[in-house]
Amino acid sequence: EVQVVESGGDLVQPGGSLRLSCVGSGFTFTTYNMSWVRQPPGKPGPVVSWVSTITTDGNTKYANAVKGRFTISRDVAKNTLYLQMNNLYIEDTAMYYCRVDGIGVRGQGTQVTVSS
């Protein structure tokens, strides 16, 4: 069974940093593109915003809102995906999910709250 579990979310002040982790099981990271998506508070339903993707060959892509501040990476040996988030803004507050692209598997999410 393909599963992913996110961690690393926290309450942080504007300008602060966090690193999110996503540990996968039941699959090999190099088989699928992997993405981070997020759902801001107060927005119901399954609508999420795409944040970043790392492709099977290691190329990275970012939403304009996070470009230059967030970095996606992976450790294939550990089957772990990361999202390094620097210079956080209040509007980055959201539930962050790790997603296995192509098969639509997503974890339970980890909450990031940016507030002074």
Image (cartoon, rainbow, N blue to C red):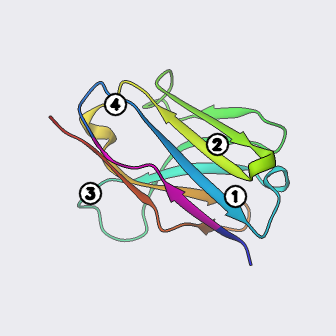
- Amino acid under label 2? Thr
In the image, 64 versus 54, the foreground residue is: 54
For marks 1 and 2, give the CA distance.
Answer: 9 Å
Q: Secondary structure at mark 3?
A: loop
Q: Earlier in the sequence, mark 4 or mark 2?
A: 2
Which residue is at 32% across, 28% downward? 16
> In this figure, which residue is indicated by the disc labeled 2?
53
The C terminus - image quarter: top left
Question: Relative to 25, is 74 above or below?
Answer: above
For marks 1 and 4, give the CA distance.
Answer: 25 Å
Residue farthest along the bottom direction in this orientation: 1
> In this figure, which residue is indicated by the disc labeled 4?
88
Circle nearer the viewer, 1 or 4 = 4
- Residue 78, position in %: x, y? 74, 50
For residue 41, which numbered disc appears in the image?
Answer: 3
- Amino acid under label 4? Leu
Q: Earlier in the sequence, mark 4 or mark 3?
A: 3
Which residue is at 46% across, 62% downward? 109
Q: Earlier in the sequence, mark 1 or mark 2?
A: 2
> In this figure, which residue is indicated by the disc labeled 1?
101
For marks 4 and 3, give the CA distance.
Answer: 16 Å
Circle nearer the viewer, 4 or 2 = 4
Residue farthest along the left direction in this orientation: 116
Q: Earlier in the sequence, mark 3 or mark 2?
A: 3
Query: Dot 1 surroundings within 10 Å: few (below 14), some, or many (20 or more)?
Result: some
Circle nearer the viewer, 4 or 3 = 4
Span of residues in magenta: 4-11
Residue 107 is a magenta residue: no
Mark 1–mark 3 contact, CB under 8 Å? no
Question: Relative to 79, is 51 above or below?
Answer: above
